[in-house]
Image (spheres, rainbow, N blue to C red):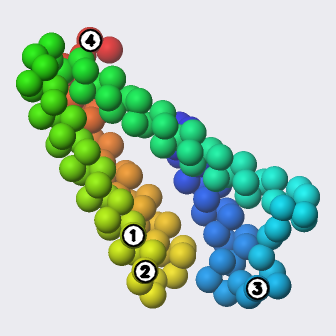
């Protein structure tokens, strides 16, 4: 739920600030007061959601087995996909895609990633 709210706020910031067409004089500065606080809060929420999702992933991995060899493999696979996602994000940022398109690509990746962990939770955990 928190991640969905965060993605919605990110879309709002992208559209409201028109980041693709912003020039140097229309950038929000910390001296601007309330507009800056709202945008900064969205970025803080991104960090909060990222930390929650990472903790949840490690918690989920820890509940799959008590064998340390398997857990280290699962953690390695998780870090592999996390690093792959960071590489894709870096490449998207360096491309000529509009910021809003990049945001919707990220949202799509997030939505596509939900069924896998959900299936693991339903199968391996008694939730």
Q: Residue at x 68, y 64 (%)?
A: 13
Q: Is residue 56 above or below residue 25?
A: above
For disc 2, the marked residue is: 94
For disc 1, the marked residue is: 90
- Horizontal relation, residue 99 to residue 120: left or right: right
How many residues crowd around disc 3 within 10 Å: few (fewer than 14), some, or many (20 or more)? few
Q: Which mark is residue 126?
A: 4
Label 3 secondary element: helix
**Front tag of 4 and 1:** 1
Q: Are marks 4 and 1 in contact (CB under 8 Å)?
A: no
**Front tag of 2 and 4:** 2
Q: Are marks 2 and 1 in contact (CB under 8 Å)?
A: yes
Q: Residue at x 24, y 18 (%)?
A: 63
Q: Is residue 62 above or below residue 104?
A: above
CA distance for labels 2 and 4: 43 Å
**Front tag of 4 and 3:** 3
Residue 82: x and y, percent?
30, 50
Q: Which mark is residue 24?
A: 3
Where, by quadrant of the figure, is residue 15 drawn? bottom right
CA distance for labels 4 and 3: 53 Å
């Amino acid at each position: 739920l928190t991640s969905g709210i965060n993605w919605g706020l990110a879309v709002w910031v992208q559209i409201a600030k028109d980041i693709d067409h912003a020039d140097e004089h229309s950038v929000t500065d910390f001296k601007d007061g309330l507009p800056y606080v709202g945008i900064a809060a969205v970025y803080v929420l991104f960090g909060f959601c990222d930390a929650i999702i990472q903790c949840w992933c490690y918690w989920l991995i820890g509940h799959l087995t008590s064998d340390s060899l398997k857990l280290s493999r699962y953690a390695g696979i998780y870090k592999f996909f996390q690093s792959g996602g960071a590489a894709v994000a870096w490449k998207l940022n360096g491309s000529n895609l509009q910021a809003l398109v990049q945001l919707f690509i990220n949202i799509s990746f997030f939505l596509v990633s939900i069924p896998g962990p959900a299936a693991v939770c339903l199968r391996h955990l008694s939730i």
